């Protein structure tokens, strides 16, 4: 008789099956920004600069909204997992999703309004007038898609929490395929019948992105309404007004996620300012290393999203043994993937540097900084996977404070001291990042161990 697979191997397969479509979705999201950058850059340096400035204002708002709405994932996953005990738990799924959509509406509109303040910031920062005008036009365009992005994120969390990430992956890849022709039309203008759209230059990328976001949202809503797997939940068949209690629950769980993301993004954003006194070569090399590692970070991030989904489902099932097994599987897979990326960086770090710059001095320093990036792959993987486990158990507030401490109390001051105080330059700041990520990994692992014990005791008395 054939031997049955061990629970560990089954969990590995389940996690990888979840992770791969999520990784493709992450690649598609990154692809939108890459296409905008390349196509705007082909128009002029000013158009590229306007897109860069516009994204600089848009991205933090997008990440904060996305972080808050990520709370939908563990809540829906828990309700889905709890169905083995309580069939009524399935009724909670459409309730959570509808309230997440109400929250998405609010956040999308607030974000849209906040983005209109960006031109004032450009004026305050004394951005050249022509660049201000181009940036303002880009922001007007891209902000129109922000409500769609918020709705799409909420629905993405809903379907992924059910263990069904592929619809979002397919739609995201289709949207990416349309990005080039849509950008082209709005960058260079077009005429259809009585409709004439003038050439908008790089700012056209913002309008193209907004239209694509709405088309992707409409496609996802249509699919979720018609697909057999989702009919039982009837998310769109019944109108349900805002439920203050449930919305506040989502916010309480999601706001720390958004703030933790904000802490991380601002740290890496300000890193360029810290190394700026060391000259253009150092700044350029730092940006090369940061950009390359940001692309590689999609791998552990995708694993982390999959871990959150599975942990939420097991949390709903009150399967303490399964939760511990998932933690081991997640950290083991994370370690293996980190070692893989470390090998890639070690072998191809010089080639990576050449892809980004023709300057031999930038290439040499970037290759050196990539060694530091290689060193922190392990601890970065551990901290993001552990945080995902905690998120799946609906523990986000302590994670936020650990992130703040590790990044802003440890990493940032240490990086400044090593880079400027000990004259280590950019290498010193990257070493500070490594120390901060290591501290985050250790503290999060300790928190996870404590949380596991509490959850075990809680479920033992139910």
Image: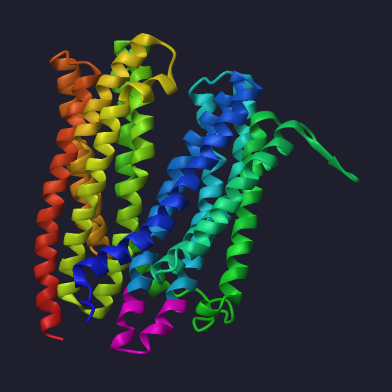
Whether residue 154 is visible here, answered yes or no, is: yes
Whether residue 393 is visible here, answered yes or no, is: no
In this rendering, position of residue 112 left or right of residue 59: right
Colour logic: rainbow
Tell me: residue 33, above or below residue 1.
above
The quarter of the picture where residue 130 lies is top right
Quadrant placement of the C terminus: bottom left
In this rendering, position of residue 303 left or right of residue 318: right
Residue drawn at (60%, 43%), measured in percent from left and top? Answer: 142
**Which of the two residues, 252 or 308, is positioned nearer the viewer here?**
308
| Residue found farthest to the front | 1
Whole-percent x, y for residue 425 in the image:
22, 16
Residue drawn at (15%, 28%), measured in percent from left and top? Answer: 414
Q: Is 24 in the magenta?
A: no
Whole-percent x, y for residue 316 in the image:
27, 77
In this rendering, position of residue 261 left or right of residue 174: left
| Residue found farthest to the right | 194
Report the span colored magenta.
78-94
Whole-percent x, y for residue 31 in the image:
51, 41
Residue drawn at (53%, 59%), measured in percent from left and top? Answer: 152
Whole-percent x, y for residue 194 in the image:
90, 45
**Which of the two residues, 325 or 100, is positioned nearer the viewer here?**
325
Quadrant placement of the N terminus: bottom left
């Amino acid at each position: 008789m054939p031997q049955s697979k061990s629970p560990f191997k089954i969990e590995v397969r389940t996690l990888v099956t979840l992770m791969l479509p999520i990784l493709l979705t992450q690649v598609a999201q990154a692809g939108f920004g890459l296409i905008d950058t390349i196509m705007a850059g082909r128009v002029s340096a000013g158009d590229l600069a306007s897109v860069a400035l516009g994204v600089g204002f848009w991205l933090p708002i997008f990440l904060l909204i996305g972080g808050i709405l990520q709370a939908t994932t563990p809540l829906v996953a828990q309700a889905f997992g709890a169905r083995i005990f309580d069939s009524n738990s399935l009724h909670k799924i459409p309730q959570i999703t509808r309230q997440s959509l109400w929250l998405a509406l609010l956040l999308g509109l607030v974000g849209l309004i906040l983005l209109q303040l960006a031109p004032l910031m450009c004026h305050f920062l004394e951005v050249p007038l022509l660049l201000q005008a181009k940036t303002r036009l880009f922001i007007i365009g891209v902000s129109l898609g922000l409500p769609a992005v918020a709705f799409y994120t909420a629905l993405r969390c809903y379907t992924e929490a059910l263990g069904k990430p592929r619809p979002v992956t397919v739609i995201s890849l289709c949207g990416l395929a349309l990005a080039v022709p849509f950008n082209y039309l709005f960058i260079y203008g077009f005429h259809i019948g009585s409709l004439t759209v003038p050439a908008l230059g790089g700012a056209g990328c913002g309008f193209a992105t907004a239209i694509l976001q709405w088309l992707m949202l409409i496609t996802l809503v249509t699919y979720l309404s018609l697909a057999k797997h989702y009919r039982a939940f009837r998310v769109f068949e019944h109108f349900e007004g805002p439920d203050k209690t449930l919305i506040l629950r989502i916010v309480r769980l999601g706001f720390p996620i958004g703030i933790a993301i904000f802490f991380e993004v601002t740290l890496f954003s300000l890193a360029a300012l810290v190394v700026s006194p060391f000259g253009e070569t150092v700044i350029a090399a730092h940006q090369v290393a940061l950009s390359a590692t940001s692309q590689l970070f999609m791998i552990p991030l995708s694993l982390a999203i999959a871990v959150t989904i599975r942990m939420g489902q097991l949390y709903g099932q009150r399967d303490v043994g399964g939760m511990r097994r998932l933690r081991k599987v997640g950290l083991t897979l994370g370690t293996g993937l980190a070692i893989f990326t470390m090998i890639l960086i070690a072998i191809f770090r010089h080639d990576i540097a050449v892809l980004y710059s023709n300057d031999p001095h930038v290439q040499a320093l970037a290759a050196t900084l990539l060694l530091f990036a290689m060193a922190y792959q392990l601890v970065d993987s551990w901290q993001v996977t552990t945080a995902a486990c905690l998120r799946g158990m609906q523990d986000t507030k302590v994670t936020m404070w650990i992130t703040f401490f590790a990044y802003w109390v440890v990493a940032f001051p240490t990086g400044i001291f090593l880079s400027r105080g000990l004259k280590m330059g950019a290498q010193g700041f990257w070493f500070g990042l490594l120390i901060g990520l290591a501290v985050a990994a250790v503290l999060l692992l300790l928190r996870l161990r404590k949380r596991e014990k509490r959850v075990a005791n809680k479920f033992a008395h139910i």
